[in-house]
Image (cartoon, rainbow, N blue to C red):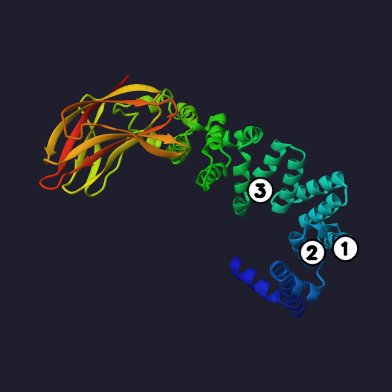
Amino acid sequence: MKRREFRANNRRKLTPKRIFGLIGLAVACLGLAGMAGWSATSTVLRSRNPALVEQMTGDPLASLVIMERETRRSPKLAAQPAILDVARDALEREPLTPSALRMLALHAELSGSPEKASSLAHLSERVSRRDMLTQFFLIEQAVQASDHELALRHYDKVLRTKDESYSLLFPILSQAITIDAIRSALAPYVRQQAEWIPEFLDFAMRRKSADLRPIAKLIVAAEAGRDRQLMDKLGPNLLGGLMEQNEPEVARRLLGQIAEGQSDLPTRVPFSKSTTDPRYGLISWTPNSSAGSGAIFEADGSGSDLKIRIFANAGERGIVLQRYLSLAAGAYKLTTRRSIVEAEEFSESYWELKCNRNGAFNSLWVSSTHTIRQVSEERFSVPKDCKVQLIQLHAVGGDAGQGLEFTVDELRLSK
């Protein structure tokens, strides 16, 4: 009953005066919606075609966009007095316009008023920390003052909010980390895992002819080698790359963080859980397998040690196993104990040791016994100028029959 009365009362209240009032309210709402729509439209047009907006409306913000684009092409234009009028008109239109404050800061900088420029730039930053160009301005000021920590704080602000800044700042930062002071200033961001750090480290490693030593030093200084998730992603390529670049000592320091007690891994040869762990990249034993030849690790039944099964089909040959070592100079004996499964008459298997000299691996030693024996002892020497070695196992399946298959049950290295 009450609902009927309420509806009836409402119908009675729809007088002509009330109807005109509702129409007026609707028109006002449409007007506000239209203004909001135009504001959004003009913002888009201002960025896409500021000259058109300026011509049609005289919008000072459009004039600011035009002036800003011109100064990007030729920064010296910001020293012209006309920039003051454009920026001030824009601020009268919208008092909290970071780009206008930034343009005034640039004008002050070029006019010889660095303190005023700094004040205006920081005001622009307070208005909007997301204004990338303001952060670039503050980065440049910090760099000029040799304040690496301040510069990196502004780097961090940009990189946290603007993904498109990666392509601009990562190349610069990748080169900058060769400087000790900058690595020290950057280490806290790596230690605290700033959201952009994994992508930055990955970018720095993938650069053409990238020097991996400062990247590894940065990770070690930040103790980020203990971060399993980060090292699972970067560790294998970084460790292998360090050995390729003849930096075994840096690789050892990083290994010591990735897994305690593993810093001497490049000197350990026997097959074990640690020397076959893929987290260490090519510093651990790495099988190479294809349809015609390959290698597979198997448990040997003792619980801790491993053995490896080697195969090569008839007519196939290849490197089936390899890894980097960092053996001290001296004479060595390599003992291999095998179990033969199948060995065609002309099949064979042999070890080869290569030395890294100036980034190129050249053959240093090839085992003299190529025929398949159950136990073989081979001797070789490592010269003083050979800090990093690459050891490889070759398998040849022969010309006919079942090819070659055997297991390496034990591998020992002694001096």
**Which of the pair 315/227 is nearer the observer?**
315
Percent coordinates x, y for residue 93 in the rendering: 83, 63
Tag 2, which secondary structure? Answer: helix
How crowded is the residue under tag 2: few (<14 C-alpha within 10 Å), some, or many (20+)?
some
Residue tagged 1: 82
- Residue 353's place in the image compared with 39, above or below, is above
Say which residue label 2 marks: 67
Q: Nearer the viewer, residue 346 or 104?
A: 346
The answer to whether 317 appears left or right of 359 in the picture is left
Quarter occupied by residue 45: bottom right
Alpha carbon distance from label 1 to label 2: 9 Å
Query: Looking at the figure, which quarter contains the N terminus?
Result: bottom right
Mark 3 neighbour density, 10 Å: few (under 14) some (14–19) many (20 or more): many
Task: Check the image and report above or below for 74 versus 15.
Answer: above
Residue 353, horizontal then vertical, whole percent: 33, 33
- Of the two numbered discs 1 and 3 in the rendering, the one whose residue sits closer to the viewer: 1
Whichever of callouts 1 and 2 sits on the residue coming sooner in the sequence is 2
Look at the image and tell me whether residue 131 can be seen: no
Q: CA distance from mark 1 to mark 3?
A: 29 Å
Identify the amino acid type marked 3: Val
Q: Are marks 1 and 3 in contact (CB under 8 Å)?
A: no
What is the secondary structure assignment of the residue under circle 3? helix
* Tag 1–tag 2 contact (CB < 8 Å): yes
Q: Residues within 10 Å of mark 1 (few under 14, many from 20)?
A: few
Q: Are marks 3 and 2 in contact (CB under 8 Å)?
A: no
Disc 2 marks a residue whose amino acid type is Met
Q: Is residue 18 left or right of residue 297?
A: right
